[in-house]
Image (cartoon, rainbow, N blue to C red):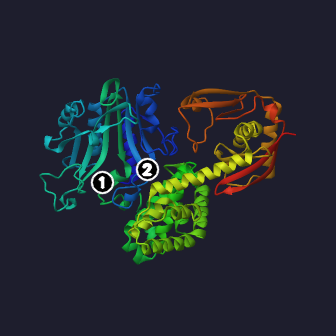
């Protein structure tokens, strides 16, 4: 059974159980406090918490996810940065009885997994919360023998809450017994089982039963309505169903792995299988991030994207791979997933361009940076130290584009360490120097804000005009305001034509002449988004935000400052349009007479 078939069967199964099929949310989450979408339940948090009335009581989805917490394990049998999560949800509708019965029905009757290979874990009871006897009884009623039901505490079998308080509950994890050949020699059948860690038992599905509300430290109350939240990793499930020993041996990775080998030194590829897997994982993750609007940068999501592309480049050097390897692999990823996630095909040019430009950018400094690193290693060893100088580590980051994690990996290969806290202090010091330079350039903050209010309001009008002229893929990628001019970076793959520039300019000036009132309202972030406000995910928004509206033409989440009426802008003129980076254009403009 192919991975595509597994996806389809999952959705078809729960559709027959009267679930609404919900499309995958973006890898850039609506929650501004989260870096990426890392679980299927994230887009349903408002329903699960009870803050928003759900439009349906049952839902299922295949969610794109991205995590970096396991990046050091990427390349083993089961870990990835990007992965897909199959899940089904009940919002105050069915509960444990149906969730357990349906999970077994799908695994046994649809995916044809042998029932005698399935084991489950349940909550043993802890911190004043009783053992989940109900789940144990339901598993047994569905034919699972007592010996294959194991009990664990909160760490393994209790989910949530997301923060310090909120919805949470016990969970049941379904594990698959791969057989004795996967069991370590020091394990015996008497003590080996789920959560053993020997590799024989693999978790394939987690059923979370949200029935409590954590109100304080060790304080739990029953929720007025019970919810179900489940998650099964597609990659791992595919590996089990296809009878493979690793996710990387499934049809999700097979074509990528073969292409890496064909474009690399055959002996090196054979010798460094983990290296091959890391490249396959990282290029897949990079493609999905770019397709959802992430661009390489020095911070936040852009930093993660840059990190995995550059990490893949470094590993490609180990394989003596072709210079065209990553771009070629990116095309393969797009072709493999375009029927499931059409946004990849729609953003094909952006994906290939961003990866190619990042490769070119890093390649220019890679050799010099490696020389600098080797010199640093020699100096450290000569001084009989075990830790690299933090200022030099920062220089590798700031001057040569080496992500901190890349330097850490190379240092570990030399049995040396990196002081991350010292690096962060160095980073903070340079940031303060930059801020001081800005303050010196622009004078007092209050005075500066007053002078750039018109420019700031003009960027809002221009942003909306760009979306009208070029398409809704346009979003802010950066900006800079001075009393003399505004600079606005935005996502768009092509140079603007003279006609497009003129059209944007005309639209903005029309809205200036329309004398639109500029109003501001404070409201929860979710309400602002629901009201149609644009928000730039590279910023971190608080729970309550300011939404600036310019008549009915433009709405954006923003901290200000702005004019009170668009007539104060007087006039808008674009003076330059140019490339700013891969897939990013830059406009410089002036306002006033």
Q: Nearer the viewer, mark 1 or mark 2?
A: 2
- Secondary structure at badge 1 equals helix
Residue 561 falls in image quadrant: top right
Which quadrant holds residue 174?
top left
What percent of the width, then of the height, locates residue 20? 43, 33
Residue behind mark 2: 67
Taking 430 as reference, is 38 left or right?
left
- Which one is nearer the viewer's eye here, 5 or 36? 36
Q: Report the front residue among 252 and 586.
A: 586
Q: Is residue 262 visible?
A: no
> Mark 1 and 2 residues: CB-CB less than 8 Å, in contact?
no
Task: In the rendered structure, find residue 205 and report the number of the disc placed on it.
Answer: none
User: Where in the figure is residue 89, as x and y percent of width and height?
Assistant: 38, 34
Which residue is rendered at x = 22% and y = 52% of the image? 196
Q: Please indicate whether residue 158 sits to the left or right of residue 397 in the image.
A: left
Q: Is residue 260 visible?
A: yes
> Which type of secondary structure does the marked residue at label 2 adopt?
loop
In the image, 448: left or right of 59? right
In primary-sequence order, the first of circles 1 and 2 is 2
Q: Is residue 577 left or right of residue 28?
A: right
Note whether 53 is above or below 376 in the view shown: above
For this rendering, which residue is in front, 244 or 524?
A: 524
Q: Which residue is mark 1?
A: 240
Q: If the image is split into quadrants, where does the C terminus sit?
A: top right
| Residue at position x 22%, y 47% in the image | 118
Residue sitting at the far left: 190
Q: Residue 174, relative to residue 209: is it above or below?
A: below
**Percent x, y for residue 51?**
46, 26
Q: Residue at x 65, y 42 (%)?
A: 472
Mark 2 surroundings within 10 Å by alpha-carbon count, few (fewer than 14), some (14 through 19), many (20 or more): some
* Residue most extreme to the top: 224
Q: Could you say where residue 430 lies in the image, as x and y percent from the top left?
A: 59, 54
């Amino acid at each position: 059974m192919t991975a595509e078939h597994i996806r389809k069967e999952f959705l078809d199964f729960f559709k027959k159980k009267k679930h609404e099929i919900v499309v995958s949310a973006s890898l850039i989450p609506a929650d501004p406090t989260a870096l990426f979408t890392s679980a299927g339940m994230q887009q349903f948090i408002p329903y699960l918490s009870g803050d928003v009335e759900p439009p349906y009581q049952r839902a299922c989805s295949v969610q794109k996810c991205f995590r970096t917490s396991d990046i050091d394990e990427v390349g083993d049998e089961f870990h990835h940065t990007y992965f897909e999560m199959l899940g089904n949800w009940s919002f105050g509708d069915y509960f444990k009885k149906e969730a357990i019965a349906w999970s077994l029905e799908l695994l046994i009757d649809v995916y044809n997994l042998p029932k005698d290979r399935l084991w489950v874990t349940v909550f043993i009871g802890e911190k004043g919360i009783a053992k989940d006897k109900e789940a144990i009884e339901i598993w047994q009623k569905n034919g699972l023998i007592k010996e294959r039901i194991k009990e664990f505490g909160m760490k393994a079998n209790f989910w949530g809450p997301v923060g310090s308080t909120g919805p949470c509950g016990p969970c049941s994890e379904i594990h698959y017994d791969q057989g004795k050949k996967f069991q370590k020699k020091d394990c015996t059948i008497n003590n080996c089982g789920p959560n053993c860690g020997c590799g024989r038992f693999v978790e394939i599905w987690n059923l979370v039963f949200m029935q409590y509300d954590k109100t304080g430290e060790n304080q739990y109350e029953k929720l007025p309505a019970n919810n179900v939240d489940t998650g099964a990793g597609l990659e791992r499930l595919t590996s089990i169903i296809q009878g493979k020993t690793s996710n990387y041996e499934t049809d999700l990775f097979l074509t990528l792995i073969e292409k890496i080998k064909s474009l690399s030194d055959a002996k090196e590829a054979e010798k460094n299988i983990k290296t091959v897997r890391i490249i396959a994982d990282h290029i897949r993750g990079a493609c999905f991030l770019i397709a959802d609007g992430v661009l390489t940068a020095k911070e936040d999501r852009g930093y993660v994207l840059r990190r995995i592309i550059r990490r893949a480049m470094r590993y490609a050097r180990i394989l003596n791979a072709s210079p065209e390897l990553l771009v070629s692999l990116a095309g393969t990823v797009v072709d493999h997933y375009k029927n499931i996630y059409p946004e990849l095909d729609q953003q094909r040019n952006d994906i290939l361009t961003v990866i190619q430009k990042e490769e070119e950018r890093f390649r220019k400094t890679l050799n010099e940076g490696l020389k600098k690193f080797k010199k640093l290693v020699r100096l450290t060893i000569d001084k009989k130290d075990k830790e690299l100088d933090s200022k030099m580590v920062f220089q590798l980051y700031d001057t040569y584009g080496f992500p901190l994690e890349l330097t850490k990996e190379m240092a570990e290969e030399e049995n040396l360490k990196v002081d991350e806290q010292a690096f962060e202090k160095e980073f903070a010091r340079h940031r303060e120097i930059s801020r001081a330079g800005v303050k010196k350039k622009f004078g007092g903050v209050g005075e500066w804000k007053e002078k750039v209010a018109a420019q700031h309001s003009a960027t809002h009008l221009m942003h909306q005009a760009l979306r009208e002229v070029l398409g809704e893929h346009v979003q802010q990628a950066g900006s800079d305001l001075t009393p003399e001019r505004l600079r606005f970076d935005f996502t768009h793959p092509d140079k603007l034509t003279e006609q497009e520039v003129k059209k944007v300019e005309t639209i903005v000036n029309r809205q200036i002449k329309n004398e639109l009132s500029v109003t501001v309202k404070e409201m929860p972030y979710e309400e602002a988004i629901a009201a149609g406000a644009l928000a730039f995910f590279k910023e971190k928004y608080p729970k309550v935000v300011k939404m600036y509206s310019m008549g009915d033409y433009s709405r954006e989440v923003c901290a200000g400052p702005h004019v009170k009426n668009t007539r104060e802008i007087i006039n808008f003129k674009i003076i330059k349009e140019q490339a700013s980076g891969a897939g990013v254009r830059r406009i410089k403009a002036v306002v006033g007479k």
